[in-house]
Amino acid sequence: MKRRSAWPERGLALLAGLAAGFAHPPFGLIVGLLGYALMLRMVDAPAERPLRQAFFRGWLAGLGFFAVSVWWIVEPFMVDAATQGWMAPFALLLLAGGLALFWGAAASLYRALKPHGFIRVLVFAGCLAGFEWLRGHVLTGFPWNPPGSSWRAGSAPSQIAAVVGVYGLSWITLAIASAPALLFDARPRAARAMALGAAVLALVGLYGFGAARLAGAQPASASAPMIRVVQANIDQKEKWRPENLDSIFATYLELSRRPAAVQPDIVVWPEGALPAVVDQLLAPGLPYAPALTATFAPGQSLLMGANRAERGPDGEYRYFNSLVAFRREDVGLRLTGVYDKHHLVPFGEYMPLGDLATKVGFRSLVHMPEDFTAGPPARPMIAAGVPPVQPLICYEALFPGLARRGVAEAGVRPAWILNVSNDAWFGMASGPLQHLNLASYRAIEEGLPIVRATPTGVSAVIDAYGRLLPGARLGLGEFGVIDARLPPALAPTPYVRWNDAAFALMLLASIGAALANRVRRA
């Protein structure tokens, strides 16, 4: 008897991951979540070597998912294509294939547990959500597009993240989305209908909870600080040419002083706004500090994403990716606060195994003489004239709980989160839109509004429910400013109080279901 080829089913596993990837922005094809049901079906398929098959099919599904999710990774290498362009395809293959290992391991664990019957969806959800949590933590973590963030931030289904966080929402999403795989079970039709009905009821509950939560939303107070976000639309390829410094600086000044119906209290420039080290730029004798002072009125504050240098004890300079706060006072411009980015991007802001990597031709993408140095753990910035703020620079907005841990460090809860980011690195496609969605989940989890400032989009003001304020958005490639009052903060959410405790209970439920299933079949 001729052996049946496994490649069609492997192709379906790859298709399952591709479909799930298209559920995320900018595509938003929520029907793509059915890819998880197809993945479960493929992992469940009979095989001579079930664990090996499960790993490979899970890896293929992950490869498809991450090929859609992180293909923007080629963009940073094309900024200096002559020097770094050759690394782009390797970066995509290594990143997508490496992240897919987590999905392969989750599929293997699921198959090793040998779940049976309708309980399979809970075990599958626990295995994949658990490995997604590991993906967000192992080797500094890379929590880009966890399954829970398939829902548009600010939508009704996303609101449960205020209770269970994005990882808990991932478990719920996976359990609901994989349930249609049960329709193919060899069980009575009524039993299959009941199982699918339970998933539908869970989905209805997700929407119902979110709708009830959003019904209590309050608008910004008329006395809240007026925030201006500056988006200068400076292309990344042009930004780092030394001859462009003066024109870039002039553009930011012009946007900052544009007339407004209400004078902004706080002006925000994005991550690394200027192609220079801020300490050197504002040194006495240069024209930049006087021009900056003349741009702002007394009482106004500037929060500027900037690169800065600091001489260490050994006499060598260390470089930081920072947010610096200035306040315009009667006597001039005063530095009132500094936040140094803590969670740096591997290969982008520093090179792991730097000496070895340099010898083989790899170099981090940072436009500094040396890699960036990590600052202390995230904590709120307390600066004169600015409500307590938790800065999250670029990549830091991916990580749940950073703002909560900052409160524990400082003993002060911020009134808002400021995410300055250089999303120009991501190009003009999916990356910036996905980053916006992921950052907005931090607003839901923390119950805090977020202000996002990027050089080329997407900049926005986001309320504490993860919703973009009407008219407070500058899209990809747009030039201008956003003027909006700071939305109110909510009381600390259940997620702030409990962290991932609810998610841990979900994982325990999956483990319990798997154990009970094995005992029953023994």
Image: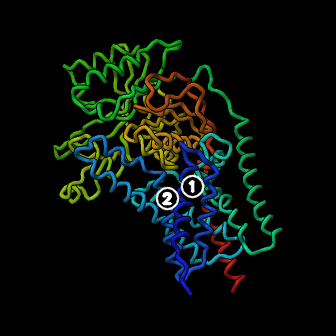
The location of residue 35, given as percent across then percent down, is 60, 59
Q: Are marks 2 and 1 in contact (CB under 8 Å)?
A: yes
Residue 20, labelled with which disc?
1
Residue 64, labelled with which disc?
2
**Foreground: 505 or 17?**
17
Q: For the residue marked with disc 1, what is the amino acid?
A: Ala
Crowd tier of the residue under label 2, counting other residues whose Cα lies within 10 Å: few below 14, some 14–19, many 20 or above = many
Residue 464, labelled with which disc?
none
In this orientation, does residue 458 appear? yes
The location of residue 405, given as percent across then percent down, is 49, 48
Q: Is residue 443 above or below residue 268?
A: below
Which image quadrant for residue 177?
bottom right
Q: For the residue marked with disc 2, what is the amino acid?
A: Gly
Q: Is residue 178 above or below residue 252?
A: below
Rounded to the nearest angstrom, the CA distance separating label 2 from label 1 is: 9 Å
The location of residue 301, given as percent across then percent down, is 42, 22
Report the quarter where the C terminus lies.
bottom right
